[in-house]
Image (cartoon, rainbow, N blue to C red):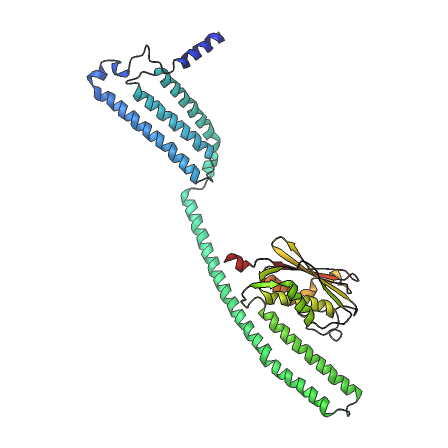
Amino acid sequence: MLTGFLSRVWLFFANLFATDGFPARWYCGSVWTEEPEVGWLHIISDLAIFGAYLAIPITLVFFLMRRRDFPFPKLVVLFALFIVSCGFVHLTEAIIFWEPVYRFSGFMKLITAIVSLGTVFAMIPVIPRVLNLPDLEKLNAQMEVEIAERKKAERELLRHMKQLEKSNQELDEFAYIASHDLRSPLQAVKNLASWIRDDNEGQLNEESVRYIELMQQRIKRMETLLDDLLQYSRVGRKNQEPEEVDTNHLLKSITDSLQRPASMKIEIGPGMPVFHTIKVPLDLTLRNLIQNAIKHHDREDGYIRVTCQNVGTYYEFAVQDDGPGISPEFHERIFKMFETLRPRDDVEGSGMGLSIVKKTVEAIDGKVSLESEIGQGTTFRILWPKILAKEGQE
């Protein structure tokens, strides 16, 4: 029985396009010949439907290619196959008027039925998801809300930018006052202390001389503080053009200009880069770190080493010393303004060097970190961008 069925299936496909035994539709009944317009009505309609059913899948495929984020691509493909198969059924119906390929016509209808049922079953699980999609009105309303919120955020940002510009202007005014108005009376006090000491040389007792020396030290500290305040206020706010910087030459220039005990050694490691960056902030950062290592070292025969290595899109500069070290509890504190771990009379300085370093490095999207333990020395590391953000956007 199975063999007989398979043989009939084989015979069907072997004669799929055979027309023997079937008359063309024009000759099926007398109406087609008596009223040919009826036949042409069918033919033209079927051909028009075929053309439309062929254009629709092409449009759907074009849509899928342009909108790859569409959530139901497989369903669209099934619809395209369903419509194409329907189109070929109509095309076959038109052809049968001349070529009675009824077996092929039946086969196309079977394919259309299978694809149609497959499309129906594929739609069943999709319908709940489609119903959960927001409708166009809701999407438009949501977009209007988002646009309104974005405009509000832009207005807030503009307001904050104006406030920031005002704050920067006030900071400029403060820097001017610190640079001129405060420095002038300080210079007068400094001159007065020198005159008192010079005019009364040999007449002052030891205690009075010590007081005058202490006054001069405090005046010098105040001058340093004013210089550092001015420097801190200008960090990241002065536009500078990047230039090619040889960091090996830069470090040699820095170490040659810094005062240190004759027995203290500063070593510059190999492989220092030559790259395009803003020179002054890099000079300021490395100078402050090396100066800090010299100033806070507990031995005159100390050792300081500066190295650099590639870390992705950054150069990592490290300033390492074999000094007294810093307890982990103070690692965050030392980067704050006016912070120092030793009495100010023991170490001259404003307590702003590391805060200037931190602000300078962060202004160019870099990072600064610290590794230190008591008695094990200190290592400051800075990540300096190989390409500055503003330069990379140009």
The reply to whether residue 354 is in sight is: no
Write down the quadrant of residue 205 in the picture: bottom right
Residue 134 location in percent, x, y?
Answer: 45, 42
Position of 22 with respect to 338 (left or right) is left
308 or 238: nearer the eye? Answer: 308
- Residue 348 in the image: state x and y as whole percent: 72, 74
**Residue visible at 40% across and 27% down?**
82
Residue drawn at x 67%, y 84% as measured from the top left: 190
When asked about the image quadrant of residue 271, the answer is bottom right
| Residue 111 in sight from this viewpoint | yes
Towards the viewer: 307 or 145? 307
Q: Residue shown at 60%/73% (left/top)?
A: 230
Judge whether 129 appears above or below 319 on screen.
above
In the picture, measured across the screen, residue 180 lies left or right of residue 60, that is right
Q: How many marks are shown on the rendered structure?
A: 0
Classify 20 as above or below 356: above
Above-or-below relation of 310 to 296: above
Residue 352: x, y in percent? 66, 70
Residue 66, how many percent across, how many down? 43, 40
